[in-house]
Amino acid sequence: MCIRDRSGSTQASAGPSHAAGIGLRVDIGQTRVDFSRPVHAVLGLPFDAMCLEEAAQAIRRAVALRQPCFLSTPNVNFLVGSRQHAGFRQSVLHSDLSVVDGMPIVWWARQLGVPLPERVAGADLFDRLGRDDGATPIRVFFYGGPEGVAQAASAALAQRTGGVVGVGGEAPGFVSIDEMDLDGTAERINASGADFVLVALGAQKGQAWIEAMRHRLKAPVMAHLGAVVNFAAQTLRRAPVWTHGIGLEWLWRITQEPALWRRYAVDGLALLRLLVLEGRPTQHYLRQARALTPKAARVRILDAPDGSALCLHLGGHLLDTELRSLREGLSTLARSGRPMRLVFESDAALGTAAMGLLMLLEGFATDSGQPLMAEVGDRRLARILALNGLRFSAGA
């Protein structure tokens, strides 16, 4: 959790410890998932409930342990794009850390009762890492942006002292991922000794590039942080701090890059549609579920009657308060290597944390090729799962 002192500054508690996650992390070949994450589902995407300090600690821990960390920072553009492109959504599900970069998402999460403590913008996170003067500097390689800007960003960081240092940069130009020399790029980035590969190719293309490169690169941390390369190179100025917490940073961005107004207008209208058609039904479902007389959660692992799959039976109220048994059940499914089947019994009621964990399982299934099916005994729950993007194959 985040603790605010009387001065208004924010400190981070230790958050979920590695000890707490023992047995809940699954690594099979190059596929991994961590069911100990404090993840919640909001408008079809998973978000880790952590503040800026916790996110910075997670990045530094990944670098120190050389532990892979694919960081995603979903904003409204991610929400909209993920509903239009399945691969874009899957890239967020495959992420090791997904923090909220958009005040409208934070505001809506609060309406749902989701404990997202604050916006964690990619630019703020990068700045926070840079202020760790006493820490071993994180070596950053910039990839993408306008011609020459990645190199300028790296050179600018190399001349400063702080928690990050530039070790290289390059831009591929306006070519598709299929036209890029991925192996050659991986060799150059690996040779730089980078700890953090910061990508700026446009959100969908950047996420797809990371998906294509994450098993080629030695750098533990990868993230598409877009305009951060311009901020680091000082070709663009960040919005004043007072705009960040009230959701007006986009207006400043338009004054810096007028062409962005069209994207913001399209995304804003699409967000309103998502809230009406998908957000409000989910909010209504959660209110009704929380008002029910509490019923003990039931989580059971059973073989399918024909032995074709391993089944996780879910019943009772899984409403975000005590989900250890669900986390253990999901990790057992993922670790089994067998076809997986979720069986939602007729009285099953799920909260945003349970749905977020199911998104992690979905991402693991698509990444590993392990079949995932579901049987849902309640039509209302089936609709809410579908509205949140959880459209499982039907179980026999």
Image (cartoon, helix red, strand yellow):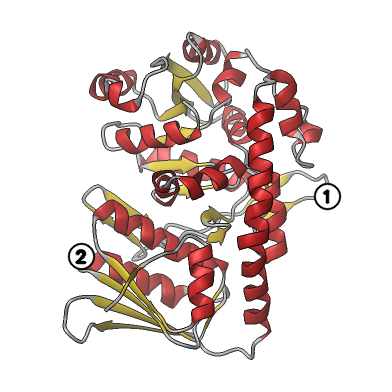
Quadrant location, the C terminus: bottom left
Q: Nearer the viewer, residue 382 or 199?
A: 382
Q: Is residue 193 left or right of residue 152?
A: left
Mark 1, secondary structure of its residue? loop
Spot occupied by residue 302 in the image (x, y as percentages of width and height): 27, 84
Mark 2, secondary structure of its residue? loop
Spot occupied by residue 278 in the image (x, y as percentages of width and height): 60, 62
| Rendered image quadrant of residue 290 | bottom right
Q: Is residue 20 visible?
A: no
Q: Is residue 26 left or right of residue 39?
A: left
Q: Which mark is residue 329?
A: none
Residue picked out by circle 2: 337
Structural distance between the alpha carbons of marks 1 and 2: 50 Å
Spot occupied by residue 116 in the image (x, y as percentages of width and height): 64, 56
Say which residue appears at 33% left-offset and 21% top-offset. 189
Q: Is residue 361 visible?
A: yes
Spot occupied by residue 252 in the image (x, y as percentages of width and height): 75, 26
Q: Is residue 287 left or right of residue 85?
A: right
Name the kind of residue labelled 1 in the image. Arg
Q: Nearer the viewer, residue 36 or 163?
A: 36
